[in-house]
Image (tube, grey):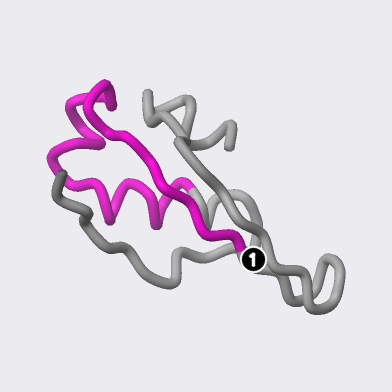
Amino acid sequence: MKALGEEGINVLAGYTNVLVYYERMSCDLVIDVRSASAGAQGNLVEVLKTRISGLGPTFKLVSSESVKL
């Protein structure tokens, strides 16, 4: 969450699924990027991939989808 917050991304909702603690875990997030940094808004998926993979070798962005309101 801190990595997203540093880019000005607000987390609206989250769901975690733990299969094996610290080995196989997933987290689904709904985020609001309206106040995100200009760099994050321009290339959101790449920024998220870089920031999340920077947390360690077991972290990765699996998918990203846009929700139109």
Describe residue 32's horizontal placement relative to residue 5 as left or right: left
Residue 22 sits in which quadrant?
Answer: bottom right
- 25 up-or-down from 8: above or below: below
- 60 up-or-down from 11: above or below: below
Describe residue 2's horizontal placement relative to residue 64 as left or right: right
Element under label 1? loop
Residue 56 drawn in magenta: no
* Residue located at (27% from left, 34% from top): 33
- 47 up-or-down from 1: above or below: below
| Residue lying farthest to the front in this orientation | 69
Front-most of residues 56 and 6: 6
Q: Position of residue 1 (x, y in %)?
A: 58, 37
Q: Position of residue 59 (x, y in %)?
A: 60, 63
* Residue located at (26% from left, 24% from top): 37
Q: Position of residue 31 (x, y in %)?
A: 38, 41
Q: Which residues are magenta?
A: 27-51
Residue 28 drawn in magenta: yes
Front-most of residues 34 and 38: 34
Q: Position of residue 45 (x, y in %)?
A: 27, 55
* Residue located at (14% from left, 50% from top): 68
Name the quarter where the C terminus is drawn: top left
* Residue located at (51% from left, 52% from top): 52
How crowded pointer 1 is (Cα within 10 Å; few <14, some 14-19, many 20+) is rated as few
Front-most of residues 21 and 42: 21
- 59 up-or-down from 36: above or below: below
Describe residue 54's horizontal placement relative to residue 40 as left or right: right
Q: Which residue is mark 1?
A: 57
